[in-house]
Image (tube, rainbow, N blue to C red):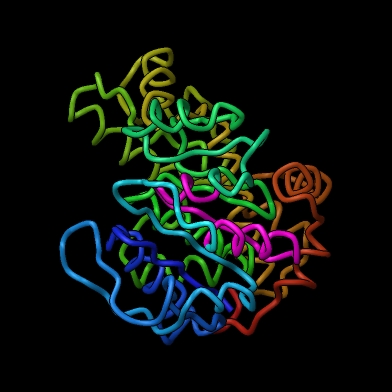
Amino acid sequence: MVVALALPGVVAFDLATAAQVFGFRDEAAHYSFTVCGLRPGPVRTSTGFAIDAAAGLDAVATADTVIVPGFYPPVEPDAAVREALRSAHERGARLASVCLGAFALAAAGLLDGRRATTHWREADEFRRRYPSVWLDPDVLFVDGGSILTGAGQSGSVDFYIHVVRSDFGAGVADAVARRMVVATHRSGDHAQDPRRDARDDDADHLARTLEWAIQRMHQPLSLTHLARHAGMPTRTFSRRFRERTRMTPMRWLSAQRVLEAQRLLETTDLPVDLIAERCGLGTAGNLRLHMSRALGTTPTEYRRTHRRIPDGPPA
């Protein structure tokens, strides 16, 4: 069960996107979702209106995943909230904060010594209050396994879809992303606030090149191929790409190839060596190496865990 803990001043966007991902009755029906507050009843949002919490703080005690959406201003939560979060962590629940929700996890002492993120605008205040946390405000999210933190606002969608992908695989995550009309995958390392000194037409060239590369990932693409398609010198392309994604072009391409392998392993009976070819990774051994590095598993084990009935005939 996924429980979203709506604290006073909850950011409505962060809460609503959680409901859309985990509570919508189609692909996300894999989850049972509810909203709780300090007590059942109305909770004021940061934008003035109220939402109705179906449950009180006791719902946290039975949740498999506890999400703490952002709340503003980020005052230290009640002692009961801090204790509920600590107890949930101690019994093995997964905790996930979004935006300024990281202030609640930090106040409970759950982020001490950990790498975490929050909305970049409140990074200085966060560091002042919680110097024991290794804060990285330049990324979309940090997956620490049992404790995850996300940047919030539109980045909350990427964060929640990452959780779905971790739980149910790339196919289900992509279906949720398509329903929400968002990009199917932005990594946690993607910049919150990229320094956009590139011109708008450069951004368009980059977007078109990414789509072009995805359609041709089975081919042996190089940095030179990507830069040439974007109409930029190789150095310029690499610099602009990193400014906007915090990834090198080839690392991004490798991640896309692993994602495609995940989809094919989930939805087809194709042999692993053929999947490796279709993804542009060449051999089954190379695919195993990339999946081990990215996911900590093998193609065979991934298929066994995430195999699902495809919507149509195998590719």
Indicate the position of residue 293 as horizontal and vertical percent values: 75, 41
Indicate the position of residue 22 as horizontal and vertical percent values: 47, 74
Residue extending furthest toward the front: 79
Indicate the quadrant containing the C terminus: top left, top right, bottom left or bottom right. bottom right
The residue depicted at 54 percent of the width and 74 percent of the height is 2
On screen, 101 above or below 68? Answer: above
On screen, 280 above or below 271? Answer: above
Indicate the quadrant containing the N terminus: top left, top right, bottom left or bottom right. bottom right
Indicate the position of residue 173 as horizontal and vertical percent values: 51, 66
Closest to the observer: 313 or 198? 198
Q: Quadrant of residue 52?
A: bottom left
Indicate the position of residue 128 as horizontal and vertical percent values: 45, 26
* Residue span colored magenta: 81-105
On screen, 181 above or below 122? Answer: below
Q: Quadrant of residue 207?
A: top left
| Residue 82 forms part of the magenta stretch | yes
Q: Is residue 83 left or right of residue 40?
A: right
Give the overall secondary structure of the magenta segment.
helix
The residue depicted at 22 percent of the width and 72 percent of the height is 50
The residue depicted at 64 percent of the width and 73 percent of the height is 64
The residue depicted at 72 percent of the width and 50 percent of the height is 295
